[in-house]
Amino acid sequence: MKLVAVLAAAGGVLAAPLVTASPAAAGPCNSVDCVPYVDRNIDPSESCVPMGDRYLFGLDASGNNYLCNVQGSWVSQPALVGVRTNGAPCDGNTGVAQTPDGLVLTCKAGAWKPDFTAFYYS
């Protein structure tokens, strides 16, 4: 019985650092500068290679935003405004955003929603 109590206490002591060692939450990303995996200094006249349907944005040397579509072409997009979560409220924003896991979002009916239009149909 004492052995069980010792093992339970040791397990609790060993598990405690694992619970408290989680990474701190990142702050909000409200500009293109903090959006992960954006290709910089692209040439929109050149082809691109989409990596599935995620992390598709690229910026030219002037800071104009583009999306790499399924055909391997850069397509002009509205300004990239930062990272947002699917379903988060928006107020008619005319820009585009990226989810933390790389999906393209647009503001529709007051919320950020996934939008594959430019990826598949442009």
Image (tube, rainbow, N blue to C red):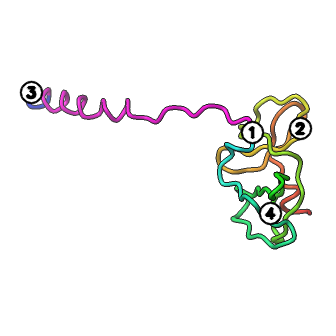
Magenta-tinted stretch:
5-31
Amino acid type of the residue that numbered disc 4 sits on in the rendered structure? Cys
In the rendered image, which residue does mark 4 sit on?
Answer: 68
Between disc 2 and disc 3, whose residue precedes? Answer: 3
Q: Choose mark 3 or mark 1, whichever is in front.
A: 1
Q: Mark 4 against mark 3, which lies toward the viewer?
A: 4
Q: Quadrant of residue 122?
A: bottom right
Most extreme residue toward the left is 2
Of the residues shown, which amino acid type is indicated by label 3? Met
Q: Which mark is residue 49?
A: none
Q: Say which residue appears at 18% left-offset and 31% top-offset.
A: 10
Give percent across and percent down for residue 92.
Answer: 91, 32
Q: Residues within 10 Å of mark 2 (few under 14, many from 20)?
A: some
Read off the residue under disc 3: 1
Determine which residue is flagged by label 2. Answer: 108
Q: Amino acid at mark 2?
A: Lys
How far is the residue under mark 2 from the one under mark 1?
Answer: 20 Å
Asked if the residue at tag 1 contacts the one at tag 2, i.e. Cβ–Cβ closer than 8 Å, the answer is: no
Q: Which residue was labeled with disc 1?
A: 31
User: Residue 66 is drawn in which quadrant?
Assistant: bottom right
Q: Earlier in the sequence, mark 4 or mark 3?
A: 3
The quadrant in which residue 108 appears is: top right
Judge whether 102 appears above or below 49 on screen: above
Q: Residue at x 87, y 70 (%)?
A: 45
- The mark closer to the camera, 2 or 3, is 2
Q: Nearer the viewer, mark 2 or mark 4?
A: 4
Q: Nearer the viewer, mark 1 or mark 4?
A: 1
The spot of residue 112 in percent (x, y) is: 81, 37
Query: Does 106 sit left or right of 8 as displayed?
Result: right
